[in-house]
Image (tube, coloured by chain):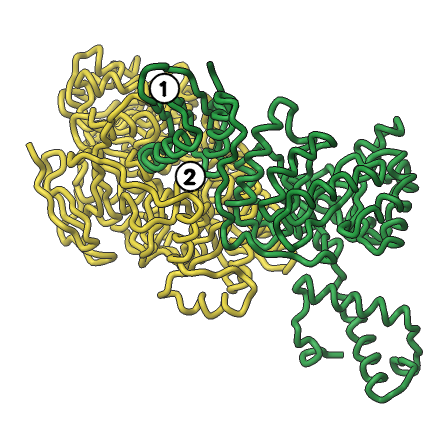
Amino acid sequence: MKTKLIQNAAGRWVPEVVNGRETTPFKGVEKYKPTAKKYGPAISSCADFPADGNKLVSSLKAALVKAGLTDGMTISTHHHFRNGDLIANQVFDIAKTLGVKDLVWFPSASFPCHEHLIPYLEDGTIHHIEGSMNGPLGKFASEGKMKGMAVLRSHGGRYQAIQDGEVKIDIAVIAAPTADFFGNATGDRGEAACGLLGFALADSQYAEKVIVATDNLVPFPCVPWQIQGNYVDYVVQVEKIGIPEKIVSGTTRITKSPDRLYIARLTAEFCEATGLIYDGFSFQVGAGGTSLSIGLYFQDILRKTGRKARFIRAGSNKYAVKMLEEGLTDYILDGQTFDLEGVRSMRENANHVNTSPFTSYNYHGKGNFAQLVDVVILGATEVDLNFNANVVTHSDGYMLHGIGGWQNCLFSKCVILPVPLFRDRIPVVVDEVTTLCGPGELIDVIVTERGIAINPKRTDLIDKAKRTNLPVKTIQELKEEAERICGKPERPTLSDKIIGVVKWVDGTVIDSIKQVEINDKT
Amino acid sequence: MKGSSGKRGDVVRADCFVEVTSQSGSPNKIVLKSKVKALFGKSIEELVQKMLAFYELNGVEVLVEDSGALSFALAARLEHAFQKYSGSSKQFIFNLLPENQYTIPGNRYRRSRLYIPGNNPKMMINAGIYGSDAIILDLEDSVSPEKKEEARILVRNALCLIDFKGAERMVRINQLPAGLTDLEYIVPCNVHTVLIPKCELPEQVIQVAEKIQQISVSRNPVFLMPIIESALGVENAYQIATASPNIVSLAIGLEDYTADLGVQRTTPATESFYARSRIVNAAHAAGIQPIDSVFSDFENDEKVLNAAHESKAMGFAGMGCIHPVQVEWVNRGFSPSEKEIKKAQKIVLAFEKAKKEGRAVVAIGSKMVDLPVVKRALKTVNDALAFGLIEKRWRVSYEN
């Protein structure tokens, strides 16, 4: 069946129906405001739960059976353990042995370790995945092998979709580094401590059934609790919920690449020269090597000028923790911890605050924290002449990355994308992005090793930058330089079949992703 | 029959591996494995076809394992593989980019010179962005013996097709006689300065200069920079420095020099104090720039800066960089400080005022300023202008 397409406000053709559900095409930034009531799960009654508060069941399988696992259900899990996750794979191993079919997996993100699930996508245990598709799963879906359409959402968009009732979670399985029998759970301690459990918050509140799995069961009460046991149906004790050494992401190292260091320094110089780094400012940097280096340059500037930040929105790591402990920032408002120092600090320091996509990113909140951040540093696989950016597909059409909080962060006061002008031979600054993830009107500055392009609508930044020695160029000039060096890329051949959609933060469809033609095996 | 060139494997980036094998009787076949195939597959195949025709090859299979190489690297690997396969010595030369046709004056400042290994295309691509005064494409120590031929071709292509953003375009050739063959590849491609390694005798310089004269078709001279790396070289420093009018600077290489002496290279560098002083003196006597060795620590910015300060204080005009992060610190170390510039500007203004008023004595307040001090101040101001540290119209904005 051919999907019917309509053109959205960004000029992109998107399907009207996704996985059998009608969708709304993108209307423009902050144009779409649904008016219905928020979704709610069925009312629960204490009478249905153990009087002594002990919700322990014997195994994950038993819990899933009790939760009523059946064909077509939507199952959610969370990526707090990143590539060290052991629970999501087990959930679907169990579904397979129970002969359950056509499940929808609704993870907050997927990682290469979830390649394990590909056979289940092939045999029909899993119908499709709604969530960031990384590496092998993305490749699988890009080649048209997944039955349903991939639905990519930002972290905030995931919360929004749950609140809208667009995604109704039947069973949420929350892997918790520490929990009690009542279901109170925390991520800041235990063998597999990962910091916080914010990505599971919406799931705990809105899923019909909630299972907490832990390898560190403590006597009631588990304090502090990040997930409230009052939302939890069953608690399962397992041998191991995650591989600690893989929980800490491999990207949390300062880059040694001279090109990236150069881009990082140029970014920091730009921020300082245009007055973005003032006493009491706030910023957010990602976990990549370049972003981390920018954080270090910010530190240097603050130290030298005697200023400090009011807060860092994080992804925390040892560098952010050092800033907090050195007094270079008052607070860390943390969405996920990237290393053990981050975990320790969150546990010990009251000014290292755990947050969730609700506080930080959700479009259906009455405001969110991301909007309040002065400077946010993000990445991109492509940026085009209109400053539109792509984070999910490569220029050859393969869907290989998730959105994470990227779209949500675009609402910060100044959005800077430090990117190389080209990666190997592939230009990053292009005529038109392969997949639109972020509208150019929200993206302010592109910093490359060969010059800085400022969005023409930011006349304030352009004026300030003019008075400096910074290498400011137009985005057109950058694109031409990339093509002079790399050659003009050919158009990759993509099929007409749509294998996934990218949602905007408000739940509308901003773009669709086409199947990649595989014309040879090389 | 077989001919291969380049690098393959998972860790290789911005390079490629080419292998030509005989398929006699069949038409030419191209097997392209490339991670950028969807975007550049056609243009890569076109290049291979064009070069197959140039080398008049028929009945061959060309395997290209590409890791995102730019054209200059692809063509270099293809050329080398085709030459090996066919025994041809024809060169497939690109036109020099318009932005690569600039010349530089012989007395140009040479604070920092960034070494780029001659067989590493990835490091060449962005070499120009770090702001070093010169870029050295190195054919000597950073290229293993079995890779010398392919590096020579790669360096030639880089000189033609990579924009080094106004840096002085240097090549360190191999020791003679191999270095003389290197010249055949690089001299026609607007190389500004040739570095002669392990120079011990003036005759070596003369040999290089003569060879360049034979090859060069340009009116602009190719400058020479002999590198002294042995005790004998140090003894002959002045003779070497004056062996050709095209010599613009004299450098010292301390790794080899200390090895020649059989001592360790240390941070205080007392073991090479004499040699370095000798080079400084010989170069100044010959009216050229003395250039210091490379500094091997690139993890510590402060150490690099200190080394540059010390080197400048000894009389050197610049030093080598083995990593792009050193460039900024070396440039800074060899540039006058803000305080020095301010002071020099004051002296220059006083000097100009005295000249205008027809006075022979320069004075600031009641203090007399000696002429050598004036001379040094003029140099400081000129340097500051050249390095972009002050504006051309600094006299207007100068505040006391």
* Numbered disc total: 2
Quadrant containing the C terminus of chain A is top left
Q: Residues within 10 Å of mark 2 (few under 14, many from 20)?
A: many
Q: Quadrant of residue A61?
A: top left
Q: Is residue B118 left or right of residue B13?
A: right
Tell me the element at label 1: loop
Residue occupying the point 46% across, 70% down? A463
Q: Are marks 2 and 1 on the same chain?
A: no
Quarter residue B369 falls in: bottom right
Nearer the viewer's eye, disc 2 or disc 1?
1
Q: Is residue A228 visible?
A: no
Labelled disc at residue A425? 2
**Colour of chain A in the image:** yellow
Is A304 on the left or on the right of B236, as rendered? left
Q: Position of residue A302 (x, y in %)?
A: 60, 56
Image quarter of the N terminus of chain A: top left
The tint of chain B in the picture is green
Q: What residue is shown at x 66% (from left), y 48% (from top)? A: B327
Q: Amino acid at mark 1?
A: Gly
Q: Callout 1: few (<14), some (14-19), or many (20+) C-alpha neighbours within 10 Å?
A: some
Residue at which label 1 appears: B59
Distance, label 2 to label 1, CA atoms, is 30 Å
Seen as rendered, the residue at the extreme left is A1
The one of A358 and A17 positioned closer to us in this rendering? A17
Estimate the x, y position of residue B63 in percent, counting from the top left: 40, 22
